[in-house]
Image (cartoon, rainbow, N blue to C red):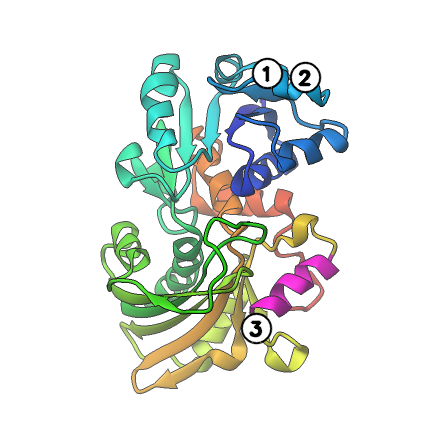
């Protein structure tokens, strides 16, 4: 069977990781990446020996790339015309323009990231919660990093025991490491409730009533989410831990092992030797799982830069009908990304 040919539009925080994720999928071929300027990410790619072919989007000044010797393979249309599907990680709003002006006329499928509006896609997609709805669709949109991790855990409990409603609190990092656009702050900021992540969860899992609050914090390494879930039956701590421990994309953390907070989890990714310190799994604290009456409560850390990559790979599998079911698709993605190996060692 021929490999699915994939292109990546935008080589920023997410685009870099999408390219790496596709390159690891043995049944996919990364045709190339597209960007506008010789950013630090592109310069680093060049210094690595240019493992991915680079294409330039409309408006890019090729002379800027020539000045530093960065080779360019062709135009954005050259890339689009040679792929089966595009992963669009352009700035918010650009993806919709790309769909209308480029992807639809070229007859090319595309997957958009969380920054685009839901209307850009045929299906608002999550690999575990609604994989089958994405089969053969031309345009999918991924959930945000917070929503991706949140749905993993809620879907996990829902499939095991049934969940009726959830209430969430998100302690949100203000910007990614290395970003300066948010400025330097010494304050917390609260959003209008309910947070969009709760609304997004209900869009994908309409049988669950969800609400939530979000607080922006002046940190960069990850979000922390607390969840209070009410099951169709009482979910005990032991029941919740049993379900979470079986999920490949949920890693169980313990404070006594040294996982004191968000920074501990990111440091662990670096100590593991993961590229950029990335962690694909959400980290869920066993110490945080507690019963409150008939409800179950828990807390997790969301590694915001990498957490959506596995679900994006699932999206390619759905849109291109590479696998028929969520079980087949997610397990294949997990295998190529090396997700779940820690369980083979009896960890997490």
Q: Position of residue 160 (x, y in %)?
A: 39, 66
Who's the residue at 56% across and 68% down the image?
262
Image-quadrant location for residue 110: top left
Mark 3 or 1, nearer chain start: 1
> SS for tag 3?
loop
Mark 3 vs mark 1: give the one in front: 1
Asked whether 67 or 178 is in front, the reply is 67
Mark 2 vs mark 3: give the one in front: 2
Image-quadrant location for residue 61: top right
The range drawn in magenta is 261-272
* Number of the label disc, if any, that sits on residue 52: none
In the picture of the structure, the residue carrying the numbered disc 1 is 62
In the picture of the structure, the residue carrying the numbered disc 3 is 261
Q: Position of residue 22 (x, y in %)?
A: 59, 35
Who's the residue at 57% across and 73% down the image?
261
Q: Position of residue 205 (x, y in %)?
A: 28, 54
Q: Position of residue 143 (x, y in %)?
A: 38, 47
- Residue 230 on the magenta segment: no
Q: Residues within 10 Å of mark 2 (few under 14, many from 20)?
A: few
């Amino acid at each position: 069977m021929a490999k699915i040919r994939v292109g990546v539009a935008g080589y920023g925080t997410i685009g870099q990781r999408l390219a790496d994720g596709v390159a690891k999928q043995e049944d996919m071929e990364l045709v190339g990446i597209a960007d506008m300027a010789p950013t630090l990410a592109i310069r680093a790619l060049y210094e690595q020996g240019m493992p991915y072919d680079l294409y330039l989007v409309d408006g890019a000044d090729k002379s800027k790339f020539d000045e530093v010797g960065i080779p360019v393979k062709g135009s954005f249309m050259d890339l689009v015309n040679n792929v089966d599907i595009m992963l669009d990680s352009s700035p918010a709003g650009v993806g919709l323009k790309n769909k209308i002006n480029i992807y639809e006329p070229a007859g090319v499928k595309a997957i958009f990231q969380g920054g685009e509006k839901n209307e850009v896609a045929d299906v608002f997609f999550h690999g575990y919660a609604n994989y089958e709805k994405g089969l053969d669709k031309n345009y999918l949109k991924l959930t945000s990093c917070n929503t991706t991790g949140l749905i993993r855990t809620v879907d996990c409990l829902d499939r095991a025991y049934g969940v009726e409603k959830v209430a969430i609190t998100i302690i949100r990092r203000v910007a990614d490491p290395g970003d300066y656009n948010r400025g330097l702050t010494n304050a917390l900021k609260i959003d209008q409730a309910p947070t969009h992540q709760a609304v997004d969860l209900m869009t994908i899992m309409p049988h669950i009533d969800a609400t939530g609050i979000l607080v922006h914090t002046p940190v960069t390494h990850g979000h922390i989410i607390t969840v209070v879930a009410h099951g169709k039956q009482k979910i005990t701590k032991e029941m919740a831990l049993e379900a979470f421990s079986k999920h490949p994309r949920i890693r169980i953390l313990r404070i006594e092992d040294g996982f004191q907070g968000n920074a501990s989890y990111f440091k662990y990714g670096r100590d593991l030797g993961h590229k950029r310190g990335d962690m694909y799994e959400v980290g869920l604290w066993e110490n945080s799982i507690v019963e409150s009456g008939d409800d179950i409560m828990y807390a997790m850390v969301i590694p915001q830069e990498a957490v959506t990559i596995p679900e994006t790979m699932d999206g390619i599998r759905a849109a291109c009908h590479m696998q028929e079911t969520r079980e087949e698709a997610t397990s294949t993605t997990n295998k190529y990304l090396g997700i779940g190996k820690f369980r083979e060692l009896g960890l997490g």
